């Protein structure tokens, strides 16, 4: 064509700028698409590219290609491109958009991808009202894999996996994605359009543009379902296929807008600005400033205290251990706290392992506790034999059952819960018993215990009660050592 | 620096955020849920994104999207959820997208139970998804390491453009120990390959498709080359009192802690026992095993699985030394006593050292 001839024509329908000039990502035939003659994808691609051009968003656009015939959409669109796993485009699009809120994220999916394997992802992305645009091309069949039944296949329609036609009895009914999603509160715009004739194509172009524009305006989730011909798999000529869209498909999938809040939907608020980098450690509560000062950990002889605390859930077993560990940390020791977790959790019992040591702690599992705190009788039975000679058992009960009586260790049996009850609340029984423990194993300064308690118990009324409970526990142990009470 | 008493599962999240993580997409599962909960609390406060996904399948594909968009991103789960994520992990490895996945393991197969186990080794270390790929795997054995190795995981993920798994058991996730954090947060940077919705990144493509066999082969070879470099540079193991050891105990995670306690007691009895703890499970610290094999008589692998890391130990030693194996499963923990008993038995055996024709006497 000579320049003189060119000048005589004005280009009315040129290539949108959002398409590449040459499809260099293709291995061959880089001047044409991989789509079959008469396929609807080419038409829908052009609508989308034109919308991107018209809205001036080429640099901001990120297209999510699916798995299916349009898996290579990124061959054609000169925008940011991400190709995702089968059906997962709405999940991928969700995170792309949330990670780069200024971007315009367009998911492009077929009916196998979106309506079958990806049904959960599209439902939830729509339900969250993600500010994304989804172009859903429905040709009622799996085309890329050679013509298997899709959720959208019409009743009676033959496919390679419904050789006698789709039957409601075996495959169920065609899935109406647009109608289904329109039952949700969040979507802003859902419309089904067709490529059955020129009038429908013009309407489809309008819908695609609106679905993208909604996102530019920040309105929320928009989806356009496009009834699209597949002459190759349908075994029709392109013209027959177009007629089939209008005359057959449309009877099962009526066209129309199922949701349109484009006029009155408010724009979504922009995400809050990120804090300054230097504020992050403070936000996380790990900044050095404001830390409780540890007591100078001057070595005062070897410490290796191993404690097992056991009882029912609700007796404060874990908190008792935590206060002990936190106090150890404050006193400059190495500590570990390990909750029992597993089968015991479900039967309502609870226990934890606590170690306090001068040296680094090898195993946080306490096998032979120096101190066993048994908040109930089953725990006493379970663990009383594990305490080595010279150790302590602190038992929340009047008397130790005969089978747990041992002469080779110290046993303090008191109704600690009852003692706490007298102080004001039985739930402070764990702190009474902790007081006894601290008195029996005098390695932690009171200041460390106070600091730990202050850190873990924020309610002033409880803090006061717990402090009284600790003091009472210490008294009980001292009394027992004076021989006033039973002492194993 | 400030020491704080903290659960391993919380330390992971705080370390991740300090390392520049600004996206967390997850699905609750015991015993990893505290990670998701802590992420829900902190990520929005630092300008990041937290989203509880509709499934682990969706969650890993959200990681795919966030990583593609150039954000440091992570998730956390346990065995059954990791199984569901394998598809997405394969895609991320194929598309060379960085991410960090914390697997706080529980008992399996199937629903199994919620107690700590190490039965995820194969699916995590060998790559449970399809295709020729690996994930880098770090195995913390303390709360401090939950923090430190999470930070390392983000660096490795970016350096190798590959998913990195922090593989910890329920004990390490649930227990509290003192932990220290760096005071300076890392500035999240936008990688030049990211698809960020900008003019500069418009030409970028994230994809794992290579339609032509020659191109896919070249891609797989390039991934292999990357993993080879990781094997040379990133393998880590801790040797604990292996000086003069004749019996070396091998374990990772909570098991390694138990092994240290056993070795300490055995040493006190005069037995020559040490511990070799793989810190990276992939790349596996093969070299450290081979070096120790020159002077050690027998290796004892202890696992809370039916013998999964055991295979890597045997491959590393390649028959050079016998390998004994002690296994507990179902959520049971190898007891101090049973390991010590085995150690005593082995230490007392008067097997001559360095006998190359010696048969491998390990049993499963």
Image (cartoon, coloured by chain):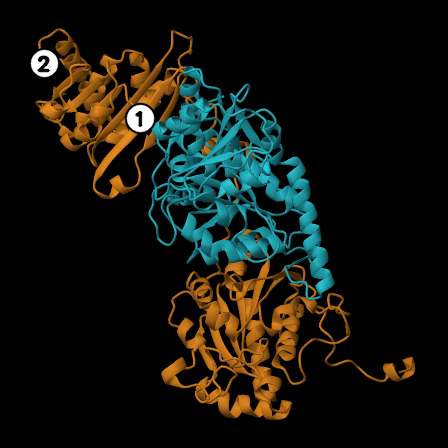
In which image quadrant can residue A59 be found? bottom right
Question: The N terminus of chain A appears in which quarter of the rendering?
Answer: bottom right
Q: Indicate which disc residue A299 carries.
A: none
Residue at x 65% of width, y 52% of height: B194
Q: Nearer the viewer, residue B352 or A296?
A: B352
Colour of chain B, in one word, is cyan
Q: Quadrant of the C terminus of chain A?
A: top left
Classify 10 Å Cα crowding around label 1: few (below 14), some (14-19), many (20 and above). some
Secondary structure of the residue carrying numbered label 2: loop
Going 39% across and 52% down the picture, which residue do you hit? Answer: B109
Q: Residue at x 49, y 81 (%)?
A: A161
Mark 1 sits on what residue? A367
Residue nearer the viewer, B313 or B102: B313
Q: Is residue B100 above or below residue A240?
A: above
- Colour chain A appears in: orange
Left or right, A399 with respect to B200, comes to left
Determine which residue is flagged by label 2: A486
Query: Which of the 4 quarters of the picture holds residue A359?
Result: top left
Q: Position of residue A361 (x, y in %)?
A: 41, 22
Residue A93 % position (x, y)? 54, 60
Instruction: Name the chain under label 1.
Output: A
Q: Position of residue A340 (x, y in %)?
A: 30, 35
Q: Nearer the viewer, mark 2 or mark 1?
A: 1
For label 2, the crowd category at 10 Å Cα-Cα, with few meaning under 14, some 14 to 19 and many 20 or more, is some
């Amino acid at each position: 064509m000579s320049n003189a001839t060119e000048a005589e024509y004005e280009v009315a329908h040129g290539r949108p700028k959002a398409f590449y000039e040459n499809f260099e990502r293709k291995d061959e035939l880089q001047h044409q698409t991989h789509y079959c003659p008469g396929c609807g994808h080419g038409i829908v691609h052009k609508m989308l590219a034109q919308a991107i051009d018209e809205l001036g968003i080429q640099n901001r656009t990120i297209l999510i290609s699916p798995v299916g015939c349009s898996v290579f959409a990124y061959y054609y669109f000169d925008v940011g491109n991400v190709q995702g796993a089968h059906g997962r485009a709405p999940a991928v699009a969700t995170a792309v958009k949330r990670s780069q809120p200024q971007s315009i994220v367009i998911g492009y999916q077929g009916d196998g991808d979106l309506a079958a394997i990806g049904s959960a992802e599209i439902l939830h992305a729509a339900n969250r009202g993600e500010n994304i645009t989804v172009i859903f091309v429905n040709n009622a069949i799996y085309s890329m894999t050679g013509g298997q039944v899709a959720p959208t296949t019409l009743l009676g329609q033959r496919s390679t996996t419904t050789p006698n036609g789709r039957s409601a009895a075996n495959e169920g009914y065609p899935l109406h994605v647009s109608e289904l999603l329109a039952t949700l509160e969040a979507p802003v715009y859902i419309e089904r359009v067709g490529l059955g004739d020129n009038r429908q194509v013009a309407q489809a172009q309008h819908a695609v543009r609106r679905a993208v524009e909604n996102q530019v305006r920040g309105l929320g989730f928009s989806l356009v379902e496009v009834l699209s011909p597949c002459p190759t798999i349908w075994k029709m000529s392109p013209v027959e296929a177009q007629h089939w869209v209008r005359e057959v498909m449309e009877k099962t999938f009526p066209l129309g807008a199922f949701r349109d809040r484009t006029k009155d939907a408010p724009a979504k608020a922009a995400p809050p600005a990120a804090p300054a980098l230097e504020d992050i450690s403070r936000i996380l509560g790990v900044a050095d400033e404001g830390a409780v000062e540890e007591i100078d950990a001057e070595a005062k002889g070897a410490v290796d205290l191993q404690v097992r605390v056991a009882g029912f859930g609700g007796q404060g077993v874990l908190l008792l251990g935590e206060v002990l560990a936190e106090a150890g940390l404050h006193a400059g020791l190495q500590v570990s706290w390990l909750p029992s977790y597993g089968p015991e959790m479900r039967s309502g019992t609870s226990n934890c392992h606590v170690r306090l040591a001068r040296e680094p702690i090898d195993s946080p599992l306490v096998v032979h506790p120096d101190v066993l705190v048994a908040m109930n009788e089953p725990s006493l039975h379970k663990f009383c034999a594990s305490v080595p000679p010279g150790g302590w058992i602190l038992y929340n009960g009047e008397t130790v059952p005969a089978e747990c009586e041992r002469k080779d260790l110290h046993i303090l049996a008191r109704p600690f819960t009852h003692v706490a009850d007298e102080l004001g609340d039985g739930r402070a029984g764990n702190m009474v018993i902790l007081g006894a423990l601290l008195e029996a194993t005098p390695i932690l300064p009171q200041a460390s215990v106070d600091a730990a308690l202050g850190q873990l118990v924020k309610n002033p009324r409880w803090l006061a009660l717990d402090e009284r409970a600790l003091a009472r526990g210490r008294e009980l142990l001292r009394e027992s050592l004076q021989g006033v009470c039973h002492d194993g | 620096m400030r020491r704080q008493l903290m659960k391993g599962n919380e330390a992971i999240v705080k370390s991740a955020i300090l390392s520049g993580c600004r996206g967390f997409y997850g699905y609750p599962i015991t015993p990893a849920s505290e990670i998701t909960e802590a992420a829900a609390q902190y990520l929005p406060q630092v300008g990041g994104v937290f989203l509880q996904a509709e499934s682990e399948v969706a969650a890993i594909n959200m990681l795919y999207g966030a990583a593609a968009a150039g954000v440091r991103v992570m998730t956390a789960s346990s065995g059954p959820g990791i199984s569901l994520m394998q598809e997405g992990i394969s895609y991320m490895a194929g598309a060379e997208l960085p991410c960090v996945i914390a697997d706080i393991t529980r008992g399996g197969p199937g629903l199994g139970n919620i107690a700590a186990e190490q039965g995820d080794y194969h699916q995590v270390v060998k790559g449970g998804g399809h295709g020729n790929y690996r994930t880098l795997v770090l195995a913390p054995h303390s709360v401090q390491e939950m923090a430190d190795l999470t930070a390392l995981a983000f660096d490795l993920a970016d350096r190798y453009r590959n998913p990195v798994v922090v593989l910890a058991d329920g004990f390490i996730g649930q227990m509290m120990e003192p932990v220290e954090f760096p005071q300076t947060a890392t500035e999240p940077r936008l990688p030049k390959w990211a698809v960020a919705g900008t003019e500069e990144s418009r030409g970028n493509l994230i994809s794992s498709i290579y339609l032509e066999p020659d191109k896919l082969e070249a891609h797989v070879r390039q991934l292999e080359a990357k993993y080879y470099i990781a094997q040379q540079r990133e393998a880590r193991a801790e040797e604990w009192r292996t000086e003069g050891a004749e019996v070396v105990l091998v374990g990772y995670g909570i098991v390694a802690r138990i092994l240290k306690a056993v070795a300490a007691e055995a040493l006190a009895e005069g037995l020559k026992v040490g511990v070799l703890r793989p810190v990276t499970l992939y790349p596996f610290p093969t070299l450290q095993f081979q070096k120790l094999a020159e002077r050690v008589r027998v290796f004892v692998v202890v696992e809370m699985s039916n013998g999964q890391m055991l295979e890597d130990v045997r491959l590393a030693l390649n028959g050079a030394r016998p390998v004994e194996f002690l296994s507990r499963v179902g959520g049971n923990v190898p007891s101090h006593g049973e390991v010590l008993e085995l150690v005593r038995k082995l230490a007392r055996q008067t097997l001559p050292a360095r006998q190359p024709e010696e048969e491998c006497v390990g049993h499963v």
